[in-house]
Image (spheres, rainbow, N blue to C red):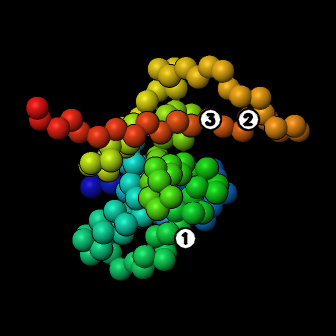
Amino acid sequence: MEGALRLKAKVEQRLRDHRLRPTKARIRIGMMLLESPKHLSADQIFDKLTKHGHCISKATVYNTLNVFAKHGVVNEVAVDPTRMYYDSTTSPHHHFYNTDTGQLTDIPRENLSVENIPRLPDNTEIEDLEIVIKIKNKQPS
């Protein structure tokens, strides 16, 4: 129980640091995401919360995650046009995405170099560069 109270205090402080009011829903979702580095979809978060008896709507989960992403509490990782994950690690890094399992794995930024970036359009600059490498399980020979 002491660990849960410590995590709750950590989440409340992180929300305040990002100028967000620590509501009950934000704290619950924050505790789930910020407990340890992880990647979760909105549906996974909703399922875990309802499985543990929390009354929360799917819309609240999606809205909260959008607010978290907008304020820098989490990063959004789009693995395809229909699947978004929320990453509790907000420092710059890349990912492996296993299309068979749906698992995202962090790749430290220093483990991947990008060369020969094409000329940018006029009056633009790179805001961020994030690479998602899609992988799949090898089929037995």
The answer to whether mark 3 and mark 2 are in CB contact below 8 A is yes
Closest to the camera, between mark 1 and mark 2, is 2
Q: Does residue 13 appear in the picture of this structure?
A: no
Residue 21 locus on image (x, y percent): 61, 65
Which mark is drawn over residue 27?
none
Looking at the image, which is closer to me, 101 or 38?
A: 101
Direction front: furthest residue: 141
Q: Amino acid at mark 3?
A: Leu
In the displayed image of the protein, which residue is found farthest to the left? 141
Q: Amino acid at mark 2?
A: Ile
Depth order, front residue of 113/15: 113
Cα–Cα span, label 3 and label 2 = 7 Å
For mark 2, what is the residue? 126
Please tell me which of labels 1 and 2 falls first in the chain. 1
Measuring 46% from the left and 50% from the top, which residue is drawn there? 79
| Residue 141: quarter of image | top left
Q: Nearer the viewer, mark 1 or mark 3?
A: 3
The residue that disc 3 covers is: 129
CA–CA distance in space, label 1 to label 2? 28 Å
Residue 58 appears left or right of 118: left
Residue at disc 1, secondary structure:
helix
Q: Amino acid at mark 1?
A: Asn
Q: Residue 72 or 12: which is nearer the viewer?
A: 72
Report the disc number at residue 63.
1
SS of the residue under disc 2: loop
- Residue 3 picture location, percent across and down: 31, 49
Point out residue 36 in the picture as x, y percentages from the top left corner. 37, 43
Please, what secondary structure does the residue beneath circle 3 have? Answer: loop
**Mark 2 nearby-residue class (10 Å; few <14, some 14–19, many ≥20):** few
Residue at 23 percent of width and 39 percent of height: 137
Residue at 62%, 35% in the rendered image: 129
